[in-house]
């Protein structure tokens, strides 16, 4: 059987080329997703500025979440360390020096780009890279700054010049005391500046804390011994001791949460790629096997058993799989790195994260390849292997027996699973979390349609049969009869079209619907007419009173956003990232936020208090006057009292708290923005002019009107969904390949049919017109089934996040899907048909 399989590979290159392409692209995609997953798991960000530190002590960013499902959660905010710990670390034997780092966001104002953002530190931190002075002297007194060479060049500043620097919500003039650059071979991509120790302490988020403690060991000291000594000295403190590439996570804290996103993204789409590959391989292998019905029947007639035939066909598929595996070995990492670069460029992953892909991702990829080849080969060859020799040897084609009890049961189970998942998405889940069942629902429904394809094809073709016959003329009548008589073949060709339609419309409209719902929730919650922000990301609280005194201002509120977890009692409905928490000024919240309270008052939102959405309060059985324990974003526990309940959009809920209580537990330690509401009778343009005048006195501030703020939020939301759209587009391209593969193989099997038609008087043009109508007919069947499969996801999601049952998004998505599916099917049909018609009918009829 092995020799026979090898000979078959030599003489049937067309069908095996289609199988090779399906397996190759499937394995490449899975391997690329595996590389993304390995990158997310390793989450390496090589140290740059801290490259000179042997060990870094930082606050623990891992939180053992409440409940059984939420363990090892990444805290969204950076927790500082008490500054007094620096002396304890410095006293450990083997430590040459320990630097308590002050880290804060800054910007040099008045450069060619308006402002040039940078990371600020005390001068002590310069020794860690190390930085060396090109000119000037260190900042020894307040009001002095050392700029890195890039910042100085862009600002046009030299030693002795004065520059204006924004930091910690304000701005001031500083004298440039020196210009520095990192040591040779050290790459520090982020612009950096250094202030004197008093200035660095003043601009830190919390004056009594440091961001981290960088340790340089003494010559000859054992790093493990030093590490154990520091751990013993800091016993009882919630700290992490980092060495090697883990030090980069201190410089780039965004990699901590980005790694989790990358793992989830690659896992979901890698699984989808394997599922799609099974469909593709089963279709191409099955059609190739049907092309050899007479050959297989002859083998059966001379005594070959079904088991021997199955092993031969499976052996052929595995040989092709081996070739695909060899080709995907170099292609997978290339695609993975390209995807990573696109994700990093779109902001999904920190660009400082190091892409990692070793041999480990190849193992699941090859496992998926083997699974795809075996399952797809068994499913695809089963009808041809079990066909009766007498029927297969007959000159006339007979309708294949496709229904088997196992296939029937599996098909019904998959459809039942899709129904159950759809009900869960519509009735149980709320908000964006309803998207969690999207992929499984689509694939379950598509699998059920594929297993029971001929039945559903009959159901769909029945109402289409007569319109096609009436409108298509003789070619349409013959095409309709062909599709109706050969439902197994029609179903095989329509299945990849169905799958492509389901994935394209289901996943794309899911993204657009989620983005639109998020934008609508943001707009509905905002009453402010303008927003003040800072170039460094933090607004000084003292500016709030200044804004309130401006003419035409009805109300203003400082605002900051973070996340928290409800610990006692635990809210099972909150996401992995926790409950969104928004800190607002209690005396301005009612004027700037569109919050409708149903109990209590937002004016009481002072200190350790919280206002909850009604449905959250009901689920945790809390009301006005009750208390609950929150775990804030920096890991600090807080007992808060419920002072108000309000109507909130389920799934997009945000609890409200006092901004002065929440801001110190954020990374910057300041409010993010000031929301401003215009007084009655004051138009928005007048308010914007007043705020613009204020920004001239405070150049670190930026003013944005309501429309621009909503548009910026929409852009940020679209950026977050862009990563999903990229991977979805790759899967859609793969399913498009399946459409071309399957259609071309199916048409190639009909060379003899075309020859017989021409011998009975049909011209080439008539055959091509018949195949055009048939391709359109099959496309419509696939589109209808794919639309139904997509609806099993989109309708429940729409019910979960909106008041309607239709998804939102541009109609062009569906129209493009329809046009592309028809164009691909038509091209994959007519080109092989034209090639088959070039042969002489007598010769083709004898094949």
Image (cartoon, helix red, strand yellow):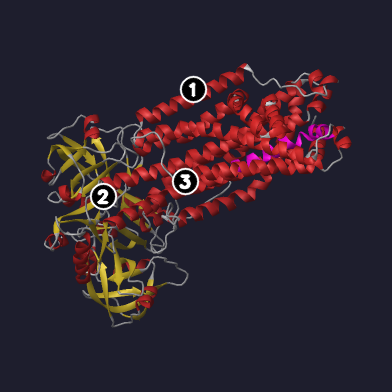
Residues tagged 2 and 1 counted as in contact (Cβ below 8 A): no
Q: Dot 1: within a 10 Å radius of its alpha carbon, few (fewer than 14), some, or many (20 or more) residues?
A: some
Q: Is residue 752 magenta?
A: yes
Residue visible at 49% across and 49% down in the picture: 39
Q: For the C terminus, which image quadrant?
A: top right
Mark before the other along the chain sequence, 3 or 2 = 2
Which residue was labeled with disc 2?
561
The image quarter containing residue 52 is bottom left
Residue toward you, 481 or 262 = 481
In the image, residue 403 lies at what x, y percent?
Answer: 64, 19
Dominant secondary structure of the residues highlighted in magenta in the image = helix
- Number of numbered tags placed on the structure image: 3
Residue visible at 71% across and 34% down in the picture: 475
Q: Is residue 603 left or right of residue 480?
A: left
In the image, residue 773 lies at what x, y percent?
Answer: 67, 36
Look at the numbered disc 2 and give the secondary structure of its residue.
Answer: strand
Could you give the CA–CA distance between mark 1 and mark 3, rounded to whole angstroms?
27 Å
Look at the numbered disc 1 and give the secondary structure of its residue.
Answer: helix
Residue toward you, 561 or 773 = 773
Is residue 37 in sight in this rendering? no
Which residue was labeled with disc 1?
416
In the image, residue 115 lies at what x, y percent?
Answer: 32, 70
The image quarter containing residue 119 is bottom left
Q: For the N terminus, which image quadrant?
A: top right
Look at the numbered disc 3 and give the secondary structure of its residue.
Answer: helix
Residue numbers of the magenta segment: 735-758
Mark before the other along the chain sequence, 1 or 3 = 1
Which residue was labeled with disc 3?
724
- Circle 3 or circle 2, nearest the eye: 3
Q: Dot 3: within a 10 Å radius of its alpha carbon, few (fewer than 14), some, or many (20 or more) residues?
A: some
Could you give the CA–CA distance between mark 2 and mark 1, rounded to whole angstroms?
42 Å
């Amino acid at each position: 059987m092995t020799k026979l399989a090898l000979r078959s590979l030599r003489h049937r290159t067309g069908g095996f080329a289609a199988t090779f392409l399906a397996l190759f692209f499937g394995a490449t995609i899975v391997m690329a997703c595996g590389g993304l997953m390995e990158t997310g798991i390793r989450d390496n960000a090589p140290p740059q500025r801290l490259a000179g530190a042997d060990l870094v002590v930082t606050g623990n960013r891992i939180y053992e979440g409440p409940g059984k499902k939420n363990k090892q959660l990444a805290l969204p905010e950076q927790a500082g360390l008490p500054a007094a710990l620096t002396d304890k670390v410095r006293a450990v034997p083997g430590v040459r020096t320990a630097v308590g780092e002050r880290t804060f966001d800054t910007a040099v104002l008045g450069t060619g780009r308006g402002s040039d953002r940078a990371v600020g530190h005390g001068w002590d931190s310069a020794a860690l890279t190390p930085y060396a002075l090109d000119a000037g002297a260190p900042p020894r007194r307040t009001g002095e700054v050392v700029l890195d060479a890039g910042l100085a060049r862009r600002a046009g500043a030299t030693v002795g010049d004065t520059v204006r620097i924004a930091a910690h919500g304000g701005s001031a003039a500083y004298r440039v005391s020196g210009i520095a650059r990192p040591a040779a071979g050290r790459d520090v991509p982020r612009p950096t500046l250094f202030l004197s120790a008093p200035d660095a302490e003043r601009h830190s988020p919390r004056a009594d804390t440091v961001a981290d403690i960088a340790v340089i060991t003494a010559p000859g000291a054992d790093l493990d011994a030093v590490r154990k000594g520091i751990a013993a000295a800091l016993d009882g403190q919630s700290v992490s001791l980092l060495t090697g590439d883990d030090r980069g996570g201190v410089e780039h804290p965004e990699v901590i949460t980005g790694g989790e996103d990358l793992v989830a993204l690659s896992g979901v789409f890698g699984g989808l790629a394997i599922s799609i590959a099974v469909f593709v391989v089963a279709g191409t292998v099955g059609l190739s096997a049907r092309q050899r019905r007479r050959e297989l029947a002859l083998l059966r007639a001379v005594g070959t058993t079904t088991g021997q035939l199955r092993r031969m066909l499976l052996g052929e598929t595995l040989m092709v799989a081996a070739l695909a595996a060899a080709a995907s070995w170099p292609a997978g990492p290339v695609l993975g790195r390209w995807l990573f670069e696109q994700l990093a460029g779109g902001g999904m992953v920190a660009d400082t994260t190091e892409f990692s892909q070793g041999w480990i991702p190849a193992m699941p990829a090859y496992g998926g390849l083997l699974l795809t080849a075996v399952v797809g080969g068994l499913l695809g060859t089963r009808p041809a292997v079990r066909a009766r020799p007498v029927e297969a040897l007959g000159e006339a084609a007979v309708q294949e027996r496709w229904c088997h009890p196992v296939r029937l049961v599996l098909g019904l189970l998959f459809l039942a699973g899709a129904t159950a998942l759809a009900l869960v998405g519509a009735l149980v889940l709320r908000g964006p979390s309803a998207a969690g069942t999207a992929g499984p629902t689509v694939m379950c429904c598509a699998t059920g349609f594929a297993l029971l394809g001929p039945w559903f094809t009959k159901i769909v073709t029945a109402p289409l049969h007569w319109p096609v016959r009436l409108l298509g003329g003789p070619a349409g009548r013959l095409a309709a009869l062909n599709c109706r008589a050969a439902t197994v073949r029609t179903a095989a060709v329509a299945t990849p079209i169905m799958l492509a339609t389901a994935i394209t419309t289901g996943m794309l409209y899911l993204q657009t619907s989620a983005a639109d719902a998020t934008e609508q929730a943001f707009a509905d919650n905002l009453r402010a007419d303008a927003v003040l922000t800072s170039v460094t990301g933090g607004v000084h609280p003292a500016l709030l009173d200044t804004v309130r005194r401006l003419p035409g201002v009805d109300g203003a509120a400082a605002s900051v956003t973070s996340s928290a977890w409800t610990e006692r009692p635990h809210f099972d409905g909150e996401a992995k990232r926790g409950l969104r928490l928004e800190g607002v000024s209690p005396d301005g919240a009612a004027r700037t936020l569109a919050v409708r309270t149903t109990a209590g008052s937002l004016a009481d939102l002072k200190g350790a208090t919280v206002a909850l959405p009604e449905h959250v309060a009901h689920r945790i059985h809390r009301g006005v006057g009750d208390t609950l324990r929150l775990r804030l974003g920096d890991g600090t526990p807080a007992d808060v009292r419920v002072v108000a309940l309000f109507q909130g959009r389920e799934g997009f809920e945000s609890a409200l708290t006092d901004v002065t209580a929440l801001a110190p537990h954020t990374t910057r330690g300041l409010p993010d923005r000031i929301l401003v509401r215009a007084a009655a009778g004051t138009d928005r343009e007048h308010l914007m002019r007043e705020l613009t005048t204020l920004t001239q006195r405070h150049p670190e501030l930026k003013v944005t009107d309501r429309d621009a703020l909503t548009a910026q939020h929409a852009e940020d939301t679209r950026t977050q969904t862009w990563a999903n759209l990229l991977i979805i587009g790759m899967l859609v391209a793969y399913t498009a390949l399946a459409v071309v593969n399957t259609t071309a193989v199916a048409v190639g099997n009909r060379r003899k049919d075309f020859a017989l038609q021409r011998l009975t008087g049909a011209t080439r043009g008539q055959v091509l017109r018949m195949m055009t109508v048939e391709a359109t007919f099959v496309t419509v069947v696939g589109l209808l089934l794919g639309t139904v499969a997509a609806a099993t996801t989109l309708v429940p999601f729409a019910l979960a996040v909106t008041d309607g049952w239709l998804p939102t998004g541009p109609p062009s998505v569906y129209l493009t899907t329809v046009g592309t599916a028809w164009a691909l099917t038509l091209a994959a049909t007519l080109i092989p048909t034209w090639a088959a018609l070039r042969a002489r009918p007598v010769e083709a009829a004898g094949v």
